[in-house]
Amino acid sequence: YKIKLSYCIFFSPDITPGLLPRPRRLLLLVNPYGGRGQAMHYCQTCILPMISEADITYNLIKTERQNHARELVRDIILSEWDGIVIISGDGLLYEVINGLMERPDWEKAIKIPVGILPCGSGNALAGAVNFHAGFDQVVGEELLLNCTFLLCRSSVSPMDLVSVTTASGHRFFSFLGVAWGFVSDVDIESERFRHMGPARFTLGVALRLASLRTYRGRLSYLPAEDGGGRRAMSRSITLAPTNGGRGFHRSPLHRTVSDMGLCEERSVLFKRSSALVEPSDFEASPSPFSPASNFSFEAVLEESAPPPLLTSLQREAETNGQPKQLAVSESHHLVEVQGPPDDLLPAFDEPVPHNWVTIEADFVLVLAIYQTHLGADLLSAPFARFDDGLIHLCCVRAGISRASLVRVLLAMEKGTHFELDCPHLTYVPVRAFRLTPLTTKGILTVDGERVEYGPLQAQAHPHLASLITGKSKVKITPL
């Protein structure tokens, strides 16, 4: 292909390199502490070789603290990038989504395609991408290979987002789900086992089963009129793992890596004064519009002295197996989230509309999910789609035995848990819901991130975001 282009340019004086389409440009955000801390290793051995073969250019940045990715995407120049790819678990994508929604130009920003390559503990969205592509359910490096292959195909699908509002007025956007009870307890309480990778959830489930809790609450929801419909599932395609360039010796990757002549984080930010990055902190580097540098994976970038924040994270990782969750300072406080209005939600001091359904009961768990997967190997809502406009509300009521709950969880690996006819398990597709915990203590999570405990309500916003899935009629094209 490249030889043919060169031939055309040589023999056709009217065709110049400037008229040819440029390679796609991706901003890669990597959490080096995600999962078992192998994200940078996988970048060297799998991800970067594959996307380079696909003629995709990139700038790779290692996040250094909590909400770092959120701050970065809030200030990027959208026209310089064709997509943002998360190399981590679901938590980093949560930061990116909300960072985009905090921009003044959120309507345009949230449409930039986002992708995810699973290198964290929770890889639910990657499992959903793999599922919708028709691949067999896999985990670990096989899932990473599948998702990287799909990323290289660059097809984009619309994705729903759900706005979640707490009683205190905080609003944020979610792409995965809201959990209360058993699921959120396991998610947060297993944080101390983060060094185990995805196995932390298995241990967390075992510990929580030994001391099963119930929570009393009031759940109100607006049922979906069409019921959403359950689509047939096909498992006819299998992607055999290949070497993927793993046999080559790679030089260590540093905090920021690029094949476009971008050697520092400043290149992806607005060229304006900021409390996050001062212009004097970095030497000037070329724009992505400048010619690409002669990059090779064997070249070792000169690494600047790491800032004190990174050193403290590394020290924490050595002692506790995970970096300390650092609070955002006042100078870097989170700005207000923008977004479309929640026209289906009443104010918290108002009762829900008459066409809503309200249930007050004791629950083992309440899960509002919008993707097929709760984890890479947990097919929680096999009939869900990225853009169905639905919140899939699942509840397990008190009274279920431990043995029955184990059967439900085991069946969830294959997505057959709704076929068990368990009387304590209920499912209903909804457009919006309100959850009011009546138990004084508990844990609420949104996309696996802990939020303030108390009443919250949520509404689906169809087709709000764009997700790189590798299976669509829409392709990423250079801007």
Image (tube, rainbow, N blue to C red):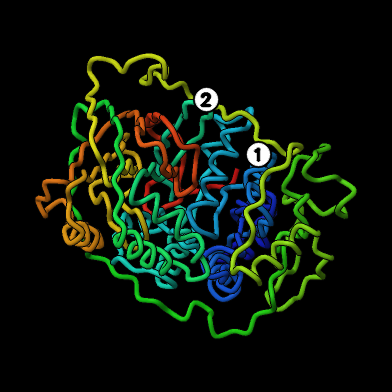
Quarter of the image with the C terminus is top right
On the image, the x and y values in percent for residue 400 come to 17, 51
Quarter of the image with the N terminus is bottom right
- Identify the element where label 1 is drawn: helix
Q: Where is mark 1, residue-wise? A: 74
Question: Residue 318 bears which disc, if any?
Answer: none
Rendered residue at 73%/41% (across/down): 329
Q: Amino acid at mark 2?
A: Gly
Label 1: how many residues lie within 10 Å, few (<14), some (14-19) or many (20+)? many
Q: Nearer the viewer, mark 1 or mark 2?
A: 2
Residue 3 visible in rendering = no
Rendered residue at 51%/34% (across/down): 172
On the image, the x and y values in percent for residue 35 come to 51, 65
On the image, the x and y values in percent for residue 459 come to 38, 29
| Vertical side of 279 occupied by 318: above or below | below
On the image, the x and y values in percent for residue 323 come to 63, 61
Label 2: how many residues lie within 10 Å, few (<14), some (14-19) or many (20+)? few
Residue 194 visible in rendering = yes
